[in-house]
Image (tube, helix red, strand yellow):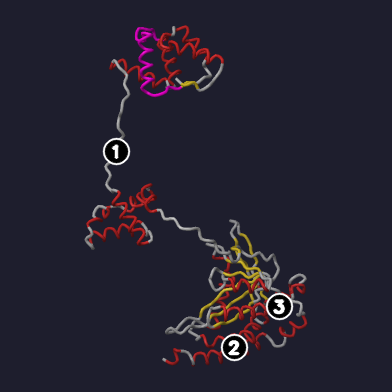
Amino acid sequence: MILKSESCHAVRWMQILMKNTEALTLDRIDDFLQASAEIDFAGQGRRGVYEWIVATLVEQEYFTLRKKQRGRVRALLSKLSGLSMPQITRLIRRYHAAGELTVRSSPRQRFPVKYTGKDLELLIEVDRAHQQLSGPATRRIVEREWQVFGKREYANLAEISASHLYNLRHSVGYRQRAAEFTKTKPSGIAIGERRRPDPQGSPGYVRIDTVHQGDWDSVKGVYHLNAIDEVTQWEVVGCIGRINEEQLLPVLEAILHQFPFRVLELHSDNGSEFVNHPLYQLLKKHAVEFSRSRPNRSSDNALVEGKNGAVIRKHLGYGHIPSEHADAIQRFYTAHFNPYLNYHRPCGFAEVRYDSRGRRKRHYAAEDYATPYEKLRSLSNGHRYLKDNLQWALLDQLAYAVSDTEAASRMMSIKAELLRRCKMESPEARC
């Protein structure tokens, strides 16, 4: 027996027990149980515990004792063996029925192994070759290896279910055989924080996106760069022939200069045309912070996505425009289209309301429609947002030189001539 707690009484009682535990009288058993109430014992080995239980039963003449006396003996057996009273009762019943108490060796139930180590090696080979496809796809592959290509070694594995295939992949044998160790690769520098901009009523937080004019018979179409301020909806559109560093960076820098206020943050989606080091260095040179849309948050760049359809697609359409016209379109945007958008085209500024169920709803009141320039002028202390070389008087000259309809008519006339030339020189016209 092993003593789990130590005390003076325990040591004294252990000295008595080690001499002749089986021969304790019933009175001594009661004294022992009271003195060792807070002490735990444990048996060491089932065979030795069983032999000691049989010796105690024989010495105490257990089956001739009265009921209360037998209870004392069972309590002693339970205390010193570490077994529970129901376990002691079952062991005594077994001894009484068979005349002996032996350790039963009952082998564990083992199910037959259907998929051997050889099948596991075949599965690992298939997973490595196909970059571990889904369970149903992998099952179909091993089935075809046997049924279509006649490879006999796959005959057993071809009967596997998709669910049990995952069981094999999670097994220790699979993980040990399929483990591949590679050197740690250095992580790249993160470009832009993934978050939603928070302008808090200040202009300078610009959303940007690209709109492709489509390809025609391997001829690339132009790309439009659409940049919109979140608070004032000031919109600047640019055009490039190809998305590369040589064309993108100059046009983007020109877009930043066309905003009358300093751009504080540029927010884009996760496209490679924006998430790259050259553009990041350009923004850093102009002290512009860069942020990107969060995963599974389609509303992060919703403002510019809506303007892509309502402005660019509405005016430029969906037809193919060859990339060689990018410079002409860029000049049209700078001289006519962008001034029209910001000084003469009203935008709706929504008021966010909450219904009885707590859902957000946008409300567009008639008095909340204004041009981006009017919205900029209406901001409290709006003059402090202007760039150092700009004043309201200069911007007023641009805003009120002609009426809104006159500016729109002039822009539409120039646009029609531009699109006519683009269409005449397009691959569609040549066909």
Residue 16 seen in the figure = yes
Q: Secondary structure at mark 2?
A: helix
Q: Is residue 367 visible?
A: no
The tag earlier along the polypeptide, 2 or 1, is 1
Residue type indicated by callout 1: Arg
Q: Where is residue 1 shown, x and y percent of the image?
A: 44, 20
Up the image or down, 165 lies above or below 3; here it is below
Q: Which residue is mark 3?
A: 260
Residue 203 shows which numbered tag? none
Callout in the foreground (3, 1): 1
Magenta stretch, main secondary structure, is helix
- How far from the left and from the top, in percent, is residue 177? 37, 51
Indicate yes or no whether the magenta region holds residue 63. Answer: yes
The answer to whether residue 192 is above or below residue 319 is above
**Residue 18 as seen in the image, left or right of residue 405:** left
The magenta region covers 42-67
Q: To which residue does mark 1 refer?
A: 110
Provide residue 270's location: percent of width, then percent of height.
Answer: 54, 68
The correct choice, above or below, for 321 with respect to 372 in the image is: below
| Label at residue 412 | 2
- How far apart marks 2 and 1 lie (CA) works out to 83 Å
Residue at (61% x, 84% y) in the render: 333
* Circles 3, 2 touching at the beta carbon (< 8 Å): no
Q: CA distance from mark 3 to mark 1?
A: 79 Å
| Quarter occupied by the C terminus | bottom left
Q: State which tag comes first along the sequence, 3 or 1.
A: 1
